[in-house]
């Protein structure tokens, strides 16, 4: 009897048990993990991925041609614990026929809740107020002291009305928002109907919004989208929130806008780099609140499951169906069951041609 050939899987970070359990269910997997909560150094990543059949990575791990060369011909699947894939060299990955698994929709609710938390915290100036309580700055009640900005009868602009953008709008609507604006590559009338959101150009959104939430993907078209011109068009009382990617914002321009009073405040879930150096100018501003990205535990399980199924050789079927809350989940699952395909894996070499999954 021929011995079972073990498939090497390299994991770039210390992960909770759920992720390892998902991999352990495949008896032919031998899992090696970078045993640290901190990012793996590039040299260690090159060493660990050498000869691996599968790679489970994070958005902070840049998988470029050098890493792919170090992995060698064995590498068949990459699973990333992220919604975005801008840290992966997809063109190079596609050339090599490597499948990519990612985790869309797993963090939709988490990110939307964090976006609303950042918005409320920033517009009501809670960090400043807490600091004043701690340092003795609160002396008495003053009618105009630390007044913030309210959502009632306001205009909210959302850059990118995807799953997360819609989830944010859904949560903000009960606060009495009068008008929703959105911008993106193209109008999305079906998705916008729930909020009666208007599709406008990016300059119009910047000029008309009282609150702006950036929730788009990082692409060549959106890199540096929020720059000096963008901030110059904003209202002086406007609050800016970014929960997409740090590189969508020109941080030097944002600093100047905040420091000069051109805009009222900013709440940042993402920065470039992450974390910001402790001496970064943005951290000196009272009206800027960089946050910390929060992760759902389900993300680990989905990523591990996607990697395990891809390692087992299942065909890829759907790039976007990874949660029961996905709009096309029922159709996608039906298609996958008929075809015997796996809905967790995104195949960048041979994407699904079914219009059901667009």
Image: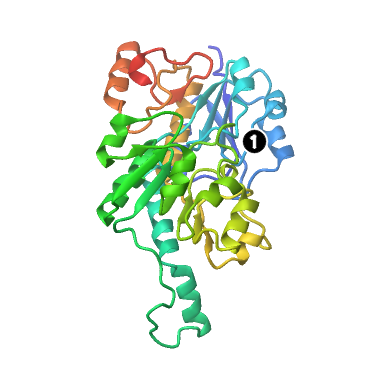
Q: Is residue 269 left or right of residue 200?
A: right
The answer to whether residue 313 shows anywhere in this view is yes
**Figure check: 334 above or below 246:** above
- Residue at x 43%, y 38% (from the top left corner): 160
Circle 1 residue: 62
Q: How is the image coloured?
A: rainbow
Farthest residue to the bottom: give it: 139
Is residue 115 found left or right of 273 in the rendered image? left
Side of 45 where 154 appears, left or right: left
Q: Nearer the viewer, residue 28 or 211?
A: 211
Q: Secondary structure at mark 1?
A: loop
**Residue located 63% across and 55% down the image:** 276
x and y, in percent, of residue 296 in the image: 42, 46
The percent coordinates of residue 83 (x first, y second) are 47, 36
Rendered-image quadrant of the C terminus: top left
**Residue pictured at 48% horizontal, 22% vertical:** 310
| Residue 288, image quadrant | bottom right
Q: How many marks?
A: 1
């Amino acid at each position: 009897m021929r011995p079972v050939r073990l498939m090497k899987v390299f994991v770039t970070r210390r992960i909770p048990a759920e992720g390892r359990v998902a991999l352990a269910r495949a008896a032919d997997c031998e899992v090696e993990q970078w045993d640290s909560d901190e990012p793996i150094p590039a040299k260690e990543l090159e060493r660990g991925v050498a000869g691996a059949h599968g790679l489970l990575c994070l958005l902070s791990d840049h998988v470029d041609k050098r890493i792919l060369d170090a992995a060698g011909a064995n590498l068949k699947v990459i699973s990333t614990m992220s919604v975005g894939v801008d840290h992966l060299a997809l063109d190079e990955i596609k050339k090599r026929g490597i499948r990519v698994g990612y985790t869309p929709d797993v963090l939709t609710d988490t990110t939307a809740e964090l976006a609303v938390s950042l918005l409320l915290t920033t517009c009501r100036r809670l960090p400043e107020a807490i600091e004043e309580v701690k340092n003795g700055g609160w002396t008495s009640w003053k009618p105009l002291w630390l007044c913030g900005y309210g959502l009632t009868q306001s205009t909210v602009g959302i850059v990118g009305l995807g799953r997360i953008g819609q989830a944010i709008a859904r949560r903000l609507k009960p606060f009495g928002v009068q008008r929703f604006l959105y911008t993106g590559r193209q109008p999305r009338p079906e998705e916008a109907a729930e909020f009666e959101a208007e599709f406008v150009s990016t300059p119009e959104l910047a000029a008309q919004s009282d609150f702006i939430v950036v929730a788009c993907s990082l692409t060549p078209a959106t890199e540096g989208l929020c720059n000096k011109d963008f901030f110059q068009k904003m209202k002086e009382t406007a609050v800016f929130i970014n929960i997409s990617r740090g590189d969508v914002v020109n941080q030097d321009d944002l600093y100047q806008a905040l420091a000069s009073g051109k805009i009222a405040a900013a709440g940042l879930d993402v920065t470039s780099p992450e974390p910001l150096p402790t001496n970064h100018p943005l951290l000196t501003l009272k009206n800027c609140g960089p946050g910390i990205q929060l992760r759902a535990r389900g993300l680990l399980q989905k990523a591990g499951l996607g990697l395990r199924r891809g390692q087992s050789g299942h065909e890829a079927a759907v790039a976007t169906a990874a949660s029961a809350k996905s709009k096309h989940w029922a159709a996608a699952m039906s298609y996958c069951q008929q075809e015997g395909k796996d809905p967790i894996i995104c195949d960048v070499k041979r994407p699904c041609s079914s219009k059901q999954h667009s």
